[in-house]
Image (tube, rainbow, N blue to C red):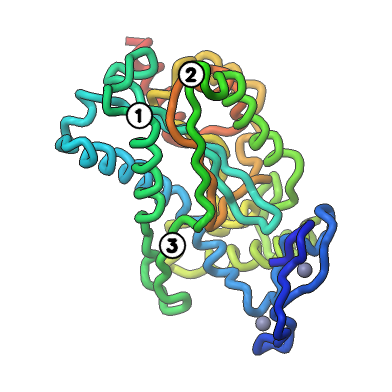
Amino acid sequence: MHRAEERCRPRRDGGTCEHGRPLGCAAVHAPGSPIVGQPLCVDCYDYTAHVLWHAHAGKLWDRFVIGVRRQLASSVGLVQSRFPDHARLSFARVAEYQRRAAVHVHAVVRLDGPAGPNDEPPVWGAADRLIDAVYASARRVLVRTPYSSAVGELALRWGDQIDIRPLRADGTGPNDDAVAAYVAKYVTKGASETGAGLDHKVTTWEDIDTAPVSKHVRTLMRTSWRLGGLPECEPLHLRTWAHTLGYRGHILTKSRAYSTTYAALRAERAQHVGLVEIPDAVTERDWRYVGSGHTPGAAFIAAGVAEDIATNREIAREEREVRR
Ligand SMILES: [Zn+2]
Ligand SMILES: [Zn+2]
């Protein structure tokens, strides 16, 4: 991939790939240059893996979450099933499309006492322990794609760029507002600044041909469309999600313990109906992480312009309970 500001991809010995294209790039590209985020060789670039990574990002996330909980439990000698008696772990994440049209995840993880955000975390629940658990799980999780005669089997993981920063509510770190602002920044960036994908579905191959996107993004859409035609890829709905490059479009997701203000979330949703599938931001093989938790607050949730199925389900359940 071409990158901006520093020397792009310097290579002392030059050399070309099997398609005759240079393996390196000695230029220094301006951040706004259209070449940034484009592959050095479109024939070497693994478009299939890129799309399939997107398509499995949700599963990778789910496994990661389970892994953090497991890791934490075992680090303090707790049986997994007793964990909820001691602590509650909650997550909120924002997916952001990078210049290379790959999704990158920003997440806030918090550890509270068993009753949730208003409950003191357990004595063993220091930031360092949480950070270790996050690293361990992020490094370990793996999703294998079902075997396909066209594609083979891929092993998908998070990338190497994991960046964890503790956030504390005790005055030594950013406060609620800072956390909310941090997340909102990426949500905003996703919606307005990137050119990865479209805000509406494509229904034909011709729609992809005429979409106002870069060649790289168009190739990703085509790849998604093609893979979507394979019976083994059917569960991934890759044609339905070709406009988001295979990523199934939940820009903001959070776990139940995070939902302190469903009312605020609903109000926000009312204002953003129609934006729910904006996928200007996506996922990538690398992701950054913000770890350790204390009260990112309701503003965080209000920053969301999209929600996931789990949230919908949660709200539906809550509404059913209210009706009863
Ligand atoms: Zn370059
Ligand atoms: Zn090549």
Task: Give the Cα separation between the discs numbered 3 and 2.
Answer: 35 Å
Badge 3, how many Cα within 10 Å: few under 14, some, many 20+?
A: many
Q: Pinpoint residue 173: horizontal percent, then vertical percent.
A: 54, 24
Badge 2, how many Cα within 10 Å: few under 14, some, many 20+?
A: few
Q: Nearer the viewer, mark 3 or mark 2?
A: 2
**Residue 144 seen anywhere in this rendered image of the structure:** yes
Q: Pinpoint residue 27: horizontal percent, then vertical percent.
A: 82, 69
Mark 1 lies on residue: 126
Task: Give the Cα separation between the discs numbered 2 and 1.
Answer: 13 Å
Q: Are marks 3 and 1 in contact (CB under 8 Å)?
A: no
Name the residue type under label 1. Answer: Ala
Asked which secondary structure carries label 2, the reply is loop
Badge 1, how many Cα within 10 Å: few under 14, some, many 20+?
A: few
Q: Is residue 290 above or below residue 13?
A: above
Q: Quadrant of residue 120?
A: top left
Task: Please state, as top left, top right, bottom left or bottom right, where the C terminus lies in the image.
Answer: top left
Name the residue: 16% across, 30% down.
Answer: 82
Q: Pinpoint residue 43: horizontal percent, then vertical percent.
A: 66, 79
Q: Which mark is residue 156?
A: 3
Task: Give the Cα separation between the discs numbered 3 and 1.
Answer: 30 Å
Q: Pinpoint residue 188: horizontal percent, then vertical percent.
A: 70, 34
Q: Is residue 26 above or below residue 196?
A: below
Q: Nearer the viewer, mark 3 or mark 1?
A: 1
